[in-house]
Amino acid sequence: MEKQTTYLSGLEYPGRFILAGQFKSGDEVCLVYGLTGRSPASQARRLVKKENGIWVEPTDPELILRGKPELLIYPAIMYSSAGIVVSNGKHTNEIMGTLETVRPPVVALARALREWKYEPDEPIYTPRISLAFAGGFNLAMSVIRRGEFGSVIRNYFELPLVPGKGWLIMTYMGINVDPLPSFFGEPISLEMVGQTAEEVAQGVYASLAPAPGKPDFRVAVASLRTSADSQIQEIKIINRNEG
């Protein structure tokens, strides 16, 4: 099984991504949200901790307005007594609201996202990626992407938490071409590296560093260490631009 840092270092442009897994020692779980961006508007963002989660916010409002603010600014991570939700858009709110009344997490994802489509950013049509965790030893992930003739393909995954093992989903396949190829298939199984949220965040951020002569697409990484009952133990955020 490939290490998460090794796998990520081989990607030129993953877009946004969610990594989740169990630490090698103990029952604690690590949840990671990462941002990369090619355009000035995508680069002009940071992750900010708030009372109920971690939000994507602009570092330069004027640059954000040149892009699509409705797709660039959103709650990336939300947590409550019901559990933890991670996503790459405003559907984070809807998933959290559903998770507070619906179990298990994979069912909550399916119900919350049944009316959601891929992002309307033609010609890329970025997938919507999501995670829900409500404690225990499994979590749920989903990928909503554009299919043939504009159809909507919704995939939901119920995944086990195993010591030392993680799961990765991304918006893109990691190749820097136009149009960007959407992520497809099952979540990628990887070996977790690190024993704290800070170690994981530092490792992930460093692994995304560009090859010599290539542009640096890194924007931000947030890592959470949580107990098996979804209680937050540690948060680490790394922003390339603090704003």
Image (tube, helix red, strand yellow):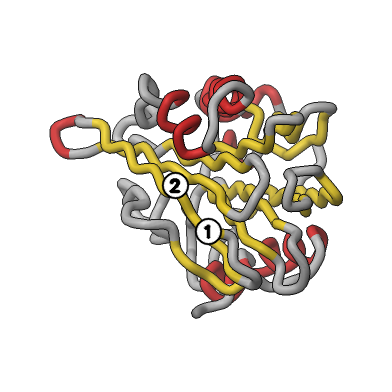
Q: Secondary structure at mark 2?
A: loop
In the rendered image, is residue 55 in sight?
no
Give the mark, 2 or 1, whose residue is nearer the N terminus: 1
On the image, numbered disc 2 is attached to which residue?
171
Looking at the rendering, which quadrant does residue 41 occupy?
top right
Q: Quadrant of the C terminus?
A: top right
Q: Give coordinates of residue 203: x percent, y percent.
A: 71, 68
User: Which residue is at a point 56% across and 37% down the rendered structure image?
Assistant: 87
Q: Give coordinates of residue 225: x percent, y percent.
A: 78, 54
Question: Going by the picture, which residue comes out furthest to the left?
Answer: 149
Seen in the picture, residue 101 relative to 14 is either above or below; the reply is above
Looking at the rendering, which quadrant does residue 174 occupy?
bottom left
Q: Give coordinates of residue 200: x percent, y percent.
A: 73, 64
* Three-letter residue code for mark 1: Pro
Q: Is residue 89 left or right of residue 53?
A: left
Q: Give coordinates of residue 189: x percent, y percent.
A: 48, 67
| Callout 2 crowding tier (Cα within 10 Å): few <14, some 14–19, many ≥20 | many
On the image, numbered disc 1 is attached to which residue?
160
| Callout 1 crowding tier (Cα within 10 Å): few <14, some 14–19, many ≥20 | some
Looking at the rendering, which quadrant does residue 114 occupy?
top left
